[in-house]
Image (cartoon, helix red, strand yellow):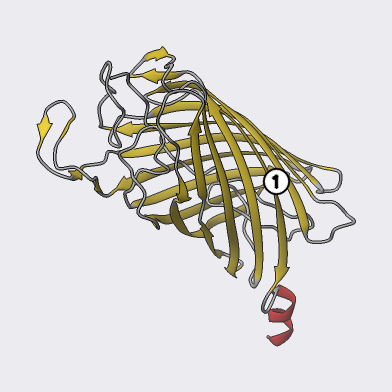
């Protein structure tokens, strides 16, 4: 049987921000929503690859051809207070391939919920040094097949994460940010009672490897904070798992590593108050048991207040 690759499914969490100190945000960025402010986002990602790594061996597969994953992701960020935010996202994913006889699938993937807080913030020189902490949980929301590489829309396991994000931003708008997260994964349950990793296992329960993600970002606010531009380098390392065997199918607990470079733009048109336009592109540079994918994202954001903003709270006090 020709081997196919299981693609690791990670949501593309984009930085969402609005000018003038009113900002939406995501788990991995350096922004916080004010109390009572909410931002909704609708994002579309088109992700393709025709080469992948079988372990460390890079190859093509005629039974796959060009693999395509499309993701539509609604999400929101809400300011519970100026220093504590909640974020939620639920992606819908569709997969397909240009070659072979296997059919793609579609459906809702894993719902993600995060609590993000400002742990430290201090004026330093001509800028501000901040540290943000995040805890998060993702859970499968539909009965998709996780053991259907590379077409499965997710890994099929719960995922608890802890993240730290330091950032230093100059008053002129230039900033640098780092972030790292450790992901603790629960077991996945597949629809067969025998599988082979480095040995035969009689069970339908798969022990999933934990992982760590990291990123470094250089960004700049332009035109009176109406245009945000970022360049980023990020990666993923799995702790455990095993390589895809020669002439075999991929599996949810494969060891999956990659490095990736990307660009991000968020524009806030003055003629549409509260709205933002998002664009992002990224490219996998190196990998292990993943596809060398090229991805493009476009979307819109909209922010408004739903209860006491800072001004309302100050007046009440």
* Depicted 269 relative to depicted 174: above or below: below
- Residue 7 rendering spot, x and y as whole percentages: 41, 32
Residue at figure coordinates x 39%, y 40% from the top left = 152
Q: Position of residue 16 (x, y in %)?
A: 66, 51
Q: Residue at x 63, y 48 (%)?
A: 43
Residue located beneath label 1 in the image: 127
* The quadrant where residue 169 appears: top right
* Residue drawn at the location 63% of the way across and 71% of the way down: 35
Q: What element carries label 1?
A: strand
Q: Number of marks in the image?
A: 1
In this view of the protein, which residue sits in the foreground, 66 or 36? 66
Q: Can residue 145 be seen in this view?
A: yes
Q: Position of residue 317 (x, y in %)?
A: 68, 85
Residue 139 at x, y = what percent?
Answer: 37, 56
Classify residue 166 as left or right of residue 272.
left
In this view, the residue farthest toward the front is 101
Q: Which residue lies furthest to the bottom in this view?
A: 316
- Dot 1 surroundings within 10 Å: few (below 14), some, or many (20 or more)? some
Quadrant of the rendering where the N terminus is positioned: top left
In this rendering, the answer to whether 317 lies above or below 155 is below
Splitting the image into 4 quarters, where does residue 120 fall? bottom right
In-image side of 170 versus 103 (left or right): right
Please name the residue shown 25% across and 32% down the image: 240
Could one spot residue 125 in this view of the protein?
no
* For residue 82, above or below residue 284: below
The foreground one among 95 and 117 is 95
């Amino acid at each position: 049987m020709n081997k196919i690759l299981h693609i690791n499914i990670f949501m593309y969490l984009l930085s969402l921000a609005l000018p003038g100190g009113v900002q939406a945000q995501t788990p991995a960025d350096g922004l916080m929503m004010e109390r009572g402010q909410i931002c909704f986002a609708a994002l579309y990602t088109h992700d393709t690859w025709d080469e992948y790594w079988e372990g460390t061996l890079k190859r093509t597969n005629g039974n796959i051809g060009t693999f395509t994953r499309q993701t539509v992701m609604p999400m929101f960020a809400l300011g519970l207070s100026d220093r504590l935010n909640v974020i939620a996202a639920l992606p819908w994913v569709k997969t397909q391939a240009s070659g072979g006889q296997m059919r793609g699938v579609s459906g809702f993937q894993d719902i993600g919920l995060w609590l993000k807080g400002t742990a430290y913030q201090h004026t330093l020189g001509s800028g501000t040094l901040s540290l943000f902490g995040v805890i998060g949980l993702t859970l499968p929301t539909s009965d998709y097949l996780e053991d259907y590489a590379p077409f499965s829309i997710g890994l099929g396991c719960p995922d608890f994460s802890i993240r730290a994000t330091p950032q230093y931003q100059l008053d002129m708008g230039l900033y640098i940010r780092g972030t790292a997260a450790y992901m603790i994964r629960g077991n996945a349950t597949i629809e067969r009672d025998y599988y082979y990793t480095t040995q035969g296992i009689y069970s339908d329960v798969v022990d999933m490897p934990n992982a760590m993600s990291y990123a470094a970002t250089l960004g700049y606010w332009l035109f009176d904070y109406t245009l945000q531009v970022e360049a980023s380098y990020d990666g993923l390392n799995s702790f455990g798992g095993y390589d895809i065997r020669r002439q075999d199918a991929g599996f949810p607990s494969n060891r999956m590593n990659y490095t990736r470079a990307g660009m991000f733009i968020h524009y806030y048109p003055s003629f549409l108050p509260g709205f933002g336009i998002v664009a992002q592109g990224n490219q996998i540079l190196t990998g292990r048991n993943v596809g060398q994918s090229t991805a493009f994202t476009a979307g819109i954001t909209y922010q408004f207040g739903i209860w006491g903003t800072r001004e309302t709270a100050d007046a009440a006090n």
